[in-house]
Image: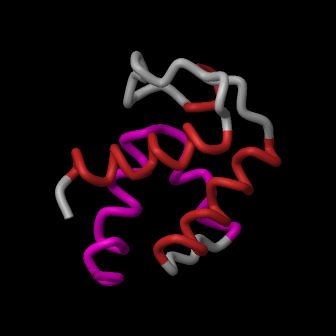
Amino acid sequence: MDAQTVRKIIIDIIADIAVDEDLSNIDDNIRLREQLDLDSMDFLDIVMELKKRYKIEVPTEDFMKLATMNGCIEYLGPKFALST
């Protein structure tokens, strides 16, 4: 799955969780929690949505790999390829 598709999936999940956030100017290299009003529960909701929607499990020790959008793309891209 290409990076743009993975990015769109992550943006869609965040949009469902943080409905009041403006997601149009996310910098892919800056931590998501620094750009958006996301707390630890929101982050867990994102991980749970990945599991629910795409059957992708993210172990606790890998949570930091999802800190930035680029990290999400790099970590999740291969997992999406395996889940399709």
Please give left or right for residue 38 compared with residue 10 in the image.
right
Region of the chain picked out in magenta, as a range: 60-84
**Residue that sits furthest to the left in the current view:** 2
Q: Is residue 79 magenta?
A: yes
Which SS does the magenta portion mostly show?
helix
Q: How many marks?
A: 0
Please name whichever residue, 8 or 68, is drawn nearer the observer in this view of the structure.
8
Horizontal side of residue 38 vs 65, given as left or right: right
Nearest to the observer: residue 18 or residue 60: 18
Q: Residue at x 40, y 20 (%)?
A: 24
Image quadrant in which the N terminus is located: bottom left
In percent of the image, x 63 and y 61: which residue is there?
47
State the scheme by which the image is colored: secondary structure
Kindly identify the residue that appears in the image at 54 percent across and 66 percent down: 50
Residue 27 locus on image (x, y percent): 40, 22
| Residue 82 pos. (x, y %) | 30, 83
Compared with 13, 57 (above or below) is: below
Q: Position of residue 15 (x, y in %)?
A: 55, 37
Residue 74 painted magenta: yes
Q: Is 67 left, or right, of 33 in this rendering?
A: left
Locate residue 84: give its quadrant. Answer: bottom left
| Above-or-below relation of 38 to 55 | above
Q: In the image, is residue 66 above or below residue 36?
A: below
Q: Position of residue 8 (x, y in %)?
A: 34, 45
Q: Residue at x 34, y 45 (%)?
A: 7
